[in-house]
Amino acid sequence: MELFVGLDVGTTGVKGILVDAFGNVRAIENEKLSMLTPKPGWAEQRPEDWWLAVKKVLRKLAERAEQLSGKIVSISTSGQMHSLVALDESDKPIHNAILWCDQRTHTECEEATEKLGGEKRVLSLVGNPILPGFTLPKILWLKKHQPELFKRIRKIMLPKDFTNFMLTGEFATEHSDASGTMLYDVSKLDWCEEVLETFEIQKSWLPTLSRSDQIVGKVKKNLAGELGLKGEVFVVAGGADNACAALGIGVIEPGDVMVSLGTSGTVVAPVVNGSSDPKGRVHFFAHTVFGVKYHMGVMLTATYSLEWFKERFLNEDYEKINEEVAKIPVGSNGVLFLPYLNGERTPHRDPHARGVFFGLSSFHSKWDVVRAIFEGVAFGIKDSFDILKELGDRVERIRITGGGSKSKVWNQMLADMLGFQIEKPAVDEGASYGAAMLACSGYTKLPLEKISKSWYKLKATTQPSSENQQNYELVYAKFKKLYAVLKDTFKEG
């Protein structure tokens, strides 16, 4: 039996799944990762820690494959976008990886935007505004603050590409991850020469570009033996985490929309002939399906808003929380929550924004407050969803993924607020499942679109309530107004 591995190098851990040719998940393994925060707003990880975790996961999956009388024939990797990995001439990291959630580069973003001729010019070059999370400003931060380290750079890559490099020795990436670096022209599907020349970044430092479903190499023989892999094992390029998550639930063509309700929250809408948002409110990236692109809105603290509150103030488990929240009426009896605990990306692009509870009185119970958290997160998703519709993106079906999708309350809120049926997939393994699809497509040469559609199975649907939608529109207007009123105060604070 031929088996395929999908890896996801995330921020909190490395996840690997073992999948057969029919899309059945045969095994799942996880290894936790920790994050380093040497200064407020900084976020780093050691690439060596990713690699140790990847090896542990692959060893366990190789054992499971043997127990199933199967053979792992190919591996593909997804990973956190934007995070900077820089290697020296000996292929050793010169610095800890600077992560996507690191906020140290505000000045570099402003300086880079000005040097390229302003934001309108930046959008025409790379399809996105330059934000602290992206890769380019991290490179510029190293150049300014660690010039000796910058001089040692010989390779620049992203987390999943570092994993593939360690597996194969090949220096490569693909379009979906490259499009989040600000070194890449999303419209031309190539590295942006003007950006490279402007900031004196050598093109030789950047990986070769390939399709997401293209084989980039084989697992090195000595390494295969160490990991318990049998015979030749091919490594397929892979994709960015959100693109792989969308692929994994069949969101690959116009009309499909993914809502991912995890620690952060995303809304992804594929487009074929689309372009960047002229106002830079949502991102414009290449998909894992070659030739397809997508608009994406991102909120930074989705389910994390609830996790944060639960850890500090609640003793109940999630089942009880959902049960009690369902009893509270739409609008949380007048309580509003702004879910900006760590700033916000879409649509506000405001690192100064903070979480707010508004409208509290002695009448309210803690469940009014908790329901306001659920609603605030859902409103944050709606912020991005409405922008995608404004840009003309087709919406015919919405599929939900992520830990928050386990909540019937959240599913119902989103169906009501967005005004569409919400589909929940039978297999909800996130980016690792999309990576497994890429591993299968690269090895078998079957079209990626065919695999994505045939592996997707529907588990349940949630129907919207028109009455609730009307009520939510009134509350949503207050939600948007509250941020507008507090915006300047956030900056002062």
Image (tube, rainbow, N blue to C red):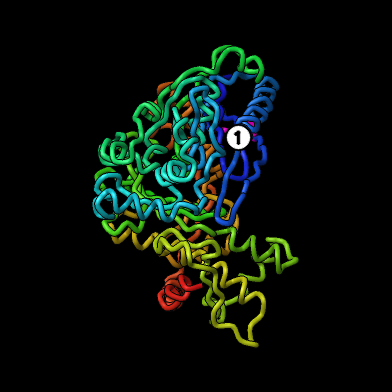
Is residue 13 located in the magenta-colored stretch of the structure?
Answer: no
Residue 347 in picture, x, y percent from top left: 39, 62
Residue sitting farthest toward the bottom: 362
Is residue 26 located in the magenta-colored stretch of the structure?
Answer: yes
Front-most of residues 135 and 28? 135
Residue 431, compared with residue 218, is above or below; it is below
Q: Amino acid at mark 1?
A: Trp
Residue 112, compared with residue 27, is above or below; it is below
User: In which quadrant will I find the N terminus?
Assistant: top right
Q: Secondary structure at mark 1?
A: helix
Q: Which residues are magenta?
A: 24-28
Residue at position x 67%, y 29% from top? 56
Front-most of residues 252 and 390? 390
Residue at position x 52%, y 45% from top? 99
Residue 228 in picture, x, y percent from top left: 66, 18
Residue 14, compared with residue 257, is above or below; it is above
What secondary structure characterizes most of the magenta part? strand
Residue 409 in picture, x, y percent from top left: 57, 64
Residue 405 in picture, x, y percent from top left: 56, 55
Residue 69, compared with residue 150, is above or below; it is above
Front-most of residues 228 and 486? 486
Residue at position x 52%, y 46% from top? 425
Q: Which residue is mark 1?
A: 50
